[in-house]
Amino acid sequence: MNTERIGIIGGTGWLGAALARALLDSGFVEADRLRLSNRSGSHPLAETGAHLLADNQALVNASDVVILSVRPEQFKALNVDASGKRVISLMAGVTSQTIREATGAETVVRAMANAAVEIRQSFTPWHCAQLLSDVDADFIQRLLECVGTASRVPTEEGIDYLSALSGTGPAFPALVMTALTRQAVIAGIPEDVARQAAHGVVVSASQLLVNHDPQAMIDSLVAYKGVTAAALQSLIDEGFEDQIGRAVEAGANVARKGM
């Protein structure tokens, strides 16, 4: 159990609330030491004993660690003074320097969770340009691990790139699943069967990757020269990997330019 008082600005939004519940359920923080901003002052999380505050500055004043869980375009309107505080940003495309200059924070950490926080399976990369003690680094790592796995990355550029890779969460699998379904329907497969088949590929069969090396699996299937090999080879020949690279780079460019 940590003694730090944690405040989440945007703590009753989908991401902030999921993080708050995970922090409480895991025992990372006691409810009495958790503060969440909420304009109405009413939310089910209040039943846990966590404090709801309508004023963001009041939340900052009452917290040792402040988590910014708001949309990037909402950041300028926050106008909070976090001098001497540790700030963890979950915003894409807002640089550490911008956050430090706007809030006066002593330490700024940028982290990029994704929608899998809902099931506590997010991969959350994080970066801090300042020197951190082992205790502080461990605190951040354990906090983010409450919603899945986390890794510190050496550069802020890495966070911008990963915002478009891991930060997309289920977006890429959802696109693949939708494409497989539509193409099966075009080929004459009943829609309900097509959906089941695509779900089996993207959600069910992909669980094999938990215990198998993906490249070894691809090499093995291509070498078999069967139906799967033909499908895979077509994607490879059409530059599938390059297309994925361009897609991620396009998202990373938005993060680099700021949002």
Image (tube, rainbow, N blue to C red):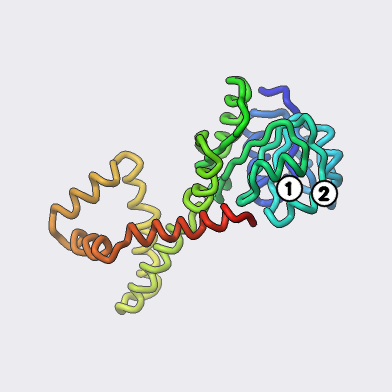
Instruction: Classify mark 2: helix, strand or loop.
Output: loop
Percent of width and height locating residue 182: 39, 73
Assess whether mark 1 and mark 2 are in contact (beta carbons under 8 angstroms).
no
The answer to whether 115 is drawn above or below residue 196 in the figure is above
Percent of width and height locating residue 77: 80, 53
What is the quadrant of residue 90 in the picture? Answer: top right
Residue appearing at x 40%, y 71% in the figure? 192
Q: Is 173 on the left or on the right of 145, as rendered?
A: left
Residue nearest the observer in this picture, 145 or 32: 145
From the image, which quarter does the N terminus lie in? top right
What amino acid is at disc 1?
A: Gly
Q: In this figure, which residue is indicated by the disc labeled 2?
A: 42
Residue appearing at x 82%, y 39% in the figure? 81
The circle drawn on residue 10 is 1
What amino acid is at disc 2?
A: Ser
- Judge whether residue 203 can be spotted in this image: yes
Q: Earlier in the sequence, mark 2 or mark 1?
A: 1
The answer to whether 175 is drawn above or below residue 213 in the figure is below
Percent of width and height locating residue 127: 57, 36
Residue appearing at x 24%, y 47% in the figure? 217
Residue nearest the observer in this picture, 248 or 116: 248
From the image, which quarter does the C terminus lie in? bottom right
- Judge whether residue 6 can be spotted in this image: no
Residue nearest the observer in this picture, 239 or 200: 239
Q: How many numbered circles does the render carry?
A: 2
Percent of width and height locating residue 36: 77, 41
Question: In the image, which is nearer the foreground, mark 2 or mark 1?
Answer: 1
Circle 2 crowding by C-alpha within 10 Å: few under 14, some 14–19, many from 20: few
Residue nearest the observer in this picture, 191 or 52: 52
Q: How much space separates mark 2 and mark 1, taking CA atoms?
A: 13 Å
